[in-house]
């Protein structure tokens, strides 16, 4: 296959018609000789913060000299982002070779795999072939029934922030969703737990007791921010002074508490991670679309927030820099999102809303429909005919001294970034 054929094969699988479960991925791993059993993992589940946490951990481990795989989803700009080794994306050639290798197995399966099961299998085989020392593995959806959960007990299971998202699949309450996420906790592993709703924390602690894992509650109050601007924030943590990250969302300090606790555990397990490795790795972390500043004059921020918890976190970050009624929001969402919970978090910050339609036919909410939802919040709302038109309009309304924040869907950033480039304003 060439790269277009390989991606067509990968994306051509329909996940929506399959029942959740590990039987398909187990069957496929049997055929491939179980590459996942030859690897070590840090496994990360949660509703929000998984990707940023994974990126920071991978950067620190790579800086410490470990050949580190990073598996994340979804991709923002190109498919290759999903599988990285020491910050380098998988090549088109490797994608093609792996698709050619996997396809004869999937053709023989009793039930075809889902798209994410296929991607997971490709990732495991890729990291095995590349002889990585450890893989930072982000769950796709949920935990217990997610295809990444075919792995043996990880070095550390990381349980990030839990929110109400994908309720139709995962449950209607935070404890229900947490129980699904807790499925990544396995006998003998250490579990790092984000500080949040006590009922959620208890679900994870109970799971650890049930399977024989060791729980570790993060202590975010020990991460002390010393400065923040739109480029970087610095902080102290215990004996570590002057640490910094180029991820400027205020919420990142809570994600950092998970990273720092995980590094402490790995060090106790014998991983050689020095203070200088921690400092350099965090400083070099790259993670797109998480309160990412794409340009200045005006400031143009893009954030992947797409559920109530994520929108609240973005709003909290914006309030560090901006007052009420000062931000132009370029917003596009999927039709199944809980707008009545999401929008109140940002309505007081909004000077104006510009509604757009993300490029996801059949699932995206049309801009005109979104406009009707937003109109009830007593803010000026415009429905743009395209994302490029929306970007241009947002820049015009913000002026040189203003601020734009694009958010609402992870299926929108690539078109926002492309629009800025075409408008020649980046």
Image (cartoon, rainbow, N blue to C red):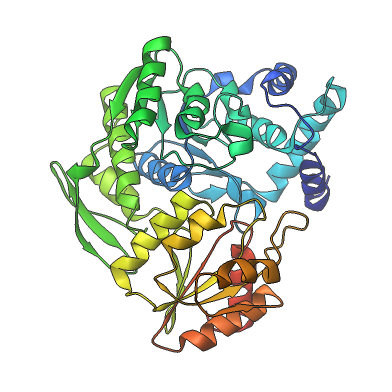
Residue 422: name its quadrant: bottom right
Quadrant assignment for the N terminus: top right
**Residue 110 image point, x, y percent:** 84, 19
Residue at (59%, 29%) from the top-left corner? 148
Residue at (37%, 55%) from the top-left corner? 284
* Residue 288 visible in the shown view: no
In the image as oriented, which residue stretches furthest toward the left? Answer: 239
**Residue 139 image point, x, y percent:** 54, 35
Q: Is residue 392 above or below residue 111?
A: below
**Residue 240 image point, x, y percent:** 16, 45
Q: Is residue 223 above or below residue 133?
A: below
In this view, the residue in front, 67 or 194, is 194
In this view, the residue in front, 233 or 5, is 233
**Residue 169 image point, x, y percent:** 63, 34
Q: Is residue 87 left or right of residue 89?
A: left
In this view, the residue in front, 255 or 79, is 255
């Amino acid at each position: 296959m060439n790269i277009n054929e390989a991606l067509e094969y990968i994306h051509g699988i329909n996940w929506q018609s399959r029942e959740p479960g590990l039987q398909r991925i187990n069957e496929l791993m049997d055929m491939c000789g179980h590459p996942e059993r030859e690897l070590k993992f840090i496994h990360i589940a949660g509703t929000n913060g998984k990707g940023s946490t994974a990126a920071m951990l991978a950067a620190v481990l790579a800086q410490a000299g470990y050949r580190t795989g990073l598996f994340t989803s979804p991709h923002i700009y190109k498919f290759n982002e999903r599988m990285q080794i020491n910050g380098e994306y998988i090549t088109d050639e490797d994608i093609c070779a792996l698709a050619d290798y996997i396809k004869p197995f999937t053709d023989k399966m009793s039930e075809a795999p889902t798209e994410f099961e296929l991607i997971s299998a490709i990732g495991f085989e890729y990291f095995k072939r590349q002889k990585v020392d450890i893989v930072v593995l982000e769950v796709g959806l949920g935990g217990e029934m997610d295809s990444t959960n075919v792995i043996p007990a990880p070095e550390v299971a990381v349980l990030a922030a839990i929110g109400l998202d994908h309720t139709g699949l995962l449950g209607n309450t935070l404890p229900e969703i947490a129980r699904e996420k807790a499925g990544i906790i396995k006998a003998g592993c250490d579990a790092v737990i984000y500080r949040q709703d006590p009922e959620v924390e208890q679900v994870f602690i109970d799971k650890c007791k049930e399977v024989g894992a060791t729980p570790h509650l993060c202590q975010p109050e020990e991460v002390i921010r010393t400065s923040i601007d739109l480029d970087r924030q610095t902080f102290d943590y215990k004996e570590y002074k002057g640490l910094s990250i180029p991820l400027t969302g205020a919420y990142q300090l809570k994600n950092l508490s998970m990273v720092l606790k995980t590094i402490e555990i790995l060090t106790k397990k014998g991983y050689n991670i020095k203070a200088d490795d921690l400092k350099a790795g965090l400083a070099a972390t790259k993670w797109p679309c998480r309160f990412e500043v794409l340009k200045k004059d005006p400031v143009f921020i893009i954030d992947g927030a797409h559920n109530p918890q994520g929108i609240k976190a973005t709003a909290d970050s914006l309030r560090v820099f901006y007052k009420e009624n000062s931000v132009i929001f370029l917003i596009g969402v999927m039709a199944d999102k809980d707008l009545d919970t999401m929008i109140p978090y940002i309505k007081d910050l909004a000077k104006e809303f510009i509604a757009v339609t993300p490029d996801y036919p059949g699932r995206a909410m049309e801009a005109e429909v979104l406009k009707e939802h937003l109109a009830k919040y007593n803010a000026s709302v415009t429905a743009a005919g395209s994302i490029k038109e929306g970007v241009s309009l947002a820049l015009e309304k913000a002026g040189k001294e203003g601020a734009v924040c694009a958010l609402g869907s992870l299926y929108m950033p690539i078109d926002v970034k492309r629009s800025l480039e075409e408008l020649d304003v980046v």
